[in-house]
Image: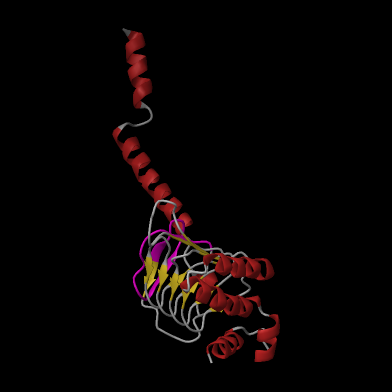
């Protein structure tokens, strides 16, 4: 039932999928869910070498690297999938959507729980990185290319490097693919604009305190003496 549910979920969420059979035969996002179930079963039985062997074979076949220890909930939709990496202590809730190039990884500084925990109905945009033992709340949307280094509250949308919350109030929905990637604010440009405005205010203030002709007058007075 679980894998059949996963296949139907992919068909429902991917507008390019024509039927469940196509998903089962052709989609790497489905294939990696099958192999991860096997690898995770072996991992829980402490057959670590065999678990890693299965996951590495799957990595070569699909381009998706999921550590056998990662915990994945129901109805995960991995779109395209190439370049995705999930670390050992990653936890993913139900009904999540993850695009290609995403890393759910560690910082290299943590021990024990080292990787992210995603709630239910979370969407992670293409190329985004979520690093460290951070908690990502239910219904969170992370924009493409963002780098998440801190916890994100439920129902939030975050973008940028490092990611900042730019919107709160996402409504739970199904499928979890409703993020308008083109409508997200550009945090970097906003920060540059803010700095330019601040610099303009400082320049105006300085010009008011020190008029441009004042240094010349002072220099002329010195020359007269």
Residue 5 in magenta stretch: no
Q: Is residue 39 visible to us here?
A: yes
- 222 w.r.t. 149: above or below: above
Q: Quadrant of the C terminus?
A: top left
- For the question of whether residue 65 can be seen, the reply is no
In the image: residue 20, left or right of residue 210: right
What is the total number of numbered labels drawn onto the structure image? 0
What's the image's color scheme? Answer: secondary structure
Q: Residue furthest top?
A: 225
**Image quadrant in which the N terminus is located:** bottom right
Q: Quadrant of residue 55?
A: bottom right
Residue at the left extreme, as displayed: 209
Q: Quadrant of residue 4?
A: bottom right
Q: Report x, y in % for residue 83.
A: 61, 64
Secondary structure predominantly adopted by residues drawn in magenta: loop
* Residue at (56, 64) in percent of width and height: 49
Give coordinates of residue 44: x percent, y percent. Answer: 46, 73
Give the side of residue 104 with respect to residue 170, left or right: right
Where's residue 163, x and y in %?
43, 60
Say which residue appears at 39% left-offset and 45% top-offset.
Answer: 200
The location of residue 169, given as percent across then percent down, is 36, 77
User: Between residues 126 and 51, which one lies in front from this camera angle?
Assistant: 51
What segment carries the magenta color?
145-165
Q: Tell me if residue 146 is in the magenta stretch.
A: yes
- Place residue 166 in its image quadrant: bottom left
Is residue 34 shown left or right of residue 137? Answer: right
Asked whether, in this view, residue 127 is left or right of residue 131, the answer is right
């Amino acid at each position: 039932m679980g894998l059949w549910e996963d296949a139907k979920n992919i068909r429902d969420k991917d507008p390019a999928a024509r039927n469940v059979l196509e998903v089962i035969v052709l989609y790497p996002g489905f294939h990696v869910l099958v192999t991860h179930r096997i690898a995770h079963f072996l991992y829980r039985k402490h057959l670590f070498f065999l678990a890693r062997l299965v996951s590495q074979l799957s990595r070569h076949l699909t381009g998706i690297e999921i550590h056998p220890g990662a915990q994945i909930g129901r109805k995960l939709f991995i779109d395209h999938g190439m370049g995705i990496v999930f670390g050992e202590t990653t936890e993913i809730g139900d009904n999540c959507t993850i695009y290609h190039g995403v890393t759910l990884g560690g910082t290299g500084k943590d021990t024990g729980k080292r990787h992210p925990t995603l709630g239910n109905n979370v969407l992670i945009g293409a190329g985004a990185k979520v690093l460290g033992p951070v908690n990502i709340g239910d219904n969170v949307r992370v924009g493409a290319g963002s780098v998440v280094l801190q916890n994100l509250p439920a129902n939030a949308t975050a973008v940028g490097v490092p990611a900042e919350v730019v919107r709160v109030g996402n409504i739970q929905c199904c499928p979890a693919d409703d993020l308008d990637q083109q409508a997200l604010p550009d945090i970097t440009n906003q920060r540059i604009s803010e700095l330019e405005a601040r610099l303009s205010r400082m320049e105006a203030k300085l010009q008011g305190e020190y008029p441009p002709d004042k240094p010349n007058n002072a220099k002329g007075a010195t020359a007269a003496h």
